[in-house]
Amino acid sequence: MKSLTQFALNKAYERVEKLDDKLTYPLQVFKNKKDETKTKNIYKTLKSILLEKIENWKQYKPIRGKI
């Protein structure tokens, strides 16, 4: 049973890693050189928040039923 749980956690981690790899900067970021670093920082912050919420999805399960 423990190995099955570990397998499921590894699969979930791999999915998050794949999603992280696929999320890249939109081309619009490079359009304006003056605000490029600011926009990149905002994007990195949003991306980290999204990945954190996905990893902690089980905590939101009781809330999802109420929505």
Image (cartoon, rainbow, N blue to C red):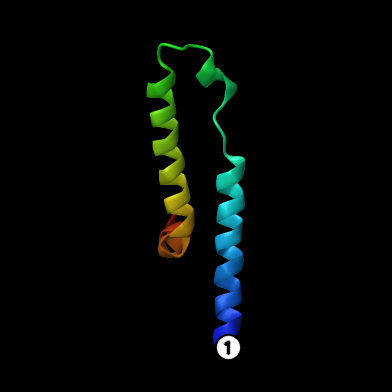
| Label 1 Cα crowd, 10 Å radius (few <14 / some 14-19 / many 20+) | few
Give the quadrant of residue 14: bottom right
Q: Residue at x 62, y 42 (%)?
A: 22
Circle 1 residue: 1
Image location of residue 47, percent across then percent down: 46, 40
Q: Amino acid at mark 1?
A: Met
Position of residue 64 measured from the top left corner of the image (x, y, whole percent): 46, 58
Dividing the picture into quadrants, the one containing residue 62 is bottom left
State which quarter of the image contains the N terminus: bottom right
> Depth check: 47 or 56 in front?
47
Please give the name of the residue rendered at 55% of the width and 62% of the height, measured from the top-left corner: 13
Q: How many marks?
A: 1
Could you say whether the residue bearing mark 1 is in a helix, strand or loop?
loop
Q: Is residue 1 left or right of residue 41?
A: right
**x and y percent of residue 49 in the render?**
41, 45
Tell me if residue 16 comes above or below residue 32 in the rendering: below
Q: Is residue 58 above or below residue 34?
A: below
Q: Is residue 37 left or right of residue 24?
A: left
Where residue 63 appears, x then y in whole percent? 41, 59
Q: Residue at x 49, y 54 (%)?
A: 54
**x 40%, y 22%: residue:** 37
